[in-house]
Image (tube, coloured by chain):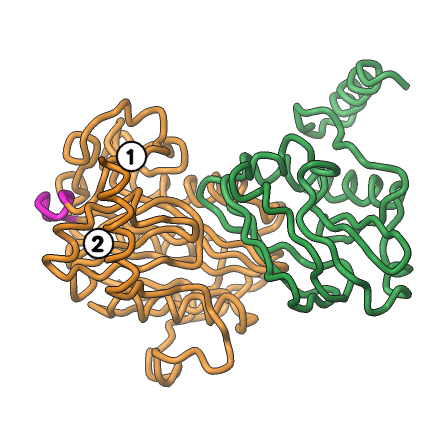
Chain colours: A green, B orange
Amino acid sequence: MAMASRLMWASRAASYLKISTCPRAFSTVIKDLKYADTHEWVKVDGSSATIGITDHAQDHLGDVVYVELPEVGSSVNQGKNFGAVESVKATSDVISPVSGEVVEVNTELNGSPGLVNASPYEDGWILKVKLSNNGEVNSLMDSEQYSKFCEEEDAKH
Amino acid sequence: MALPQAIKAGLPCMNLLRMTAVPILEQLYLEERLLRTSAENWCIINHGTSLPTIVMGISGRPSELVELKPVLRDQIPVIRRFSGGGTVIIDNGTLFVSLICNKNAIPGLQPYPHPIMSWTGQMYGQVLHEFGDFHLRENDYAFNSHKFGGNAQSIIKDRWIHHTSFLWDYDARNMEYLKLPSRAPKYRSARSHVEFLCRMKNYVPSRTTFIEGTIKSLGGHFSIRPFDLDELGSLSGSGSLSGSTKLLTRQELEEAYSFQCVAVR
């Protein structure tokens, strides 16, 4: 369904149901990624993974002005924070969706933190890890589940 | 004023911790510890801090934000706190109010910067609207277009903190320690610190009026439980918590000053 039609449908439905809608279009979700309920994405490639925050997250956080990156060689654990992003007045923890060893961080974010907003799934990636437990990925959501999760979360508020 | 002592049915509990002249570094250590290790809601009020102190946000760089020559000369402490936001210089005229909440404490409130800022702005608006033309202006609290309250937040997995430094009064001379920030709200319109800021004491009858009004406003959402400082044990020392709040060393400030001098040339 074209985006404009979806927006019109959503707006009419919201009006009929007397619920408020976010004026922004629905957040982008990429099909082949896995997602955490804390709004991080992970792209698995064998025993490695790339991690970032989702379009939904960057939209709700606002303009990112600083990204606190973990140290290469440090460990991250599923469900635990490994860094933070700062947007205007707030720092927000970034939670790792998987466990492993940090092998690379996106140093471009030091000079251009706005990449997280502009390109959350590509140029705005945050870190790459060597996975310690591939099975953890099975506990994450696929793109359809995550889309539904975001819609339900936004509808509650 | 008597505080509501009975637990209000259906409202989450909020511990109210009142302090006077606790050093801001200790307050920040405490707040970070409560944010990350407590499961309860907190309101922390601190009247003033013992020494004039500069407090930057998590990404603050002293070479960009602070006039380092006088700061080094006068040995003004510089802290980098765990929350986001800008740089303030605080002293015994500053009033601190911090709210630490579980993400589900306020029905319908999403744990993101803008909704939290909006909710707290409305809460303080209820307290202050009768004393002046109160506004939440681009994340600041202002009477008309003059800022009197600076806000910062930190949001973790299931909790958030929104803390505010209110300028009940301030020493204008202390503003000389701060540079004009490169990242400033539009409504500031390039005004100097003194032209941009105002003192709450020129609008609100007393600190007590403001504090009791705030507690009453919070009481509409929480069952407030006074909490004694002694119940927390030692304020300093974070146990096993590796916090982000940091007092910058003299060496770090001197290195930043060297960088600042090079940048000027």
Residue B242 x/y as whole percent: 49, 73
> Is residue B217 positioned above or below B82 on the image?
above
Q: Visible in this render: residue B105?
A: no
Please give the name of the residue rendered at 56% of the width and 71% of the height, measured from the top-left corner.
B39
Left or right of A147 on screen, residue B219: left
Please give the name of the residue rendered at 84% of the width and 41% of the height, measured from the top-left corner.
A148
User: Observer-nearest residue: B134 or B100?
Assistant: B100
Residue B77 x/y as whole percent: 22, 62
Secondary structure category for the residue under label 1: strand
Secondary structure category for the residue under label 2: strand
Per the model, the C-alpha gap separating discs 1 and 2 is 17 Å
Lower sequence index among marks 1 and 2: 2
Q: Which amino acid does label 2 sit on?
A: Ile
**In the rendered structure, does residue B9 fall within the stretch colored magenta?**
no
Label 2 packing within 10 angstroms: few (<14), some (14-19), many (20+): many
Please give the range of residues in magenta.
Answer: B169-176
Which secondary structure dominates the residues rendered in magenta? Answer: helix
User: Observer-nearest residue: B20 or A141?
Assistant: A141
- Nearest-to-viewer mark from 1 and 2: 2
Q: In which quarter of the image is residue B9?
A: bottom right
User: Observer-nearest residue: A30 or A141?
Assistant: A30
- Residues marked 1 and 2, same chain: yes
> Quadrant where the C terminus of chain B lies?
top left
Q: Which mark is residue A111?
A: none
Left or right of B129 on screen, residue B195: left
Q: Name the residue under label 2.
A: B90
> Is residue A79 positioned above or below A122 on the image?
below
Chain for disc number 2 = B
Residue B59 x/y as whole percent: 43, 49
Q: Name the residue under label 1.
A: B142
Q: What residue type is labelled 1?
A: Ala
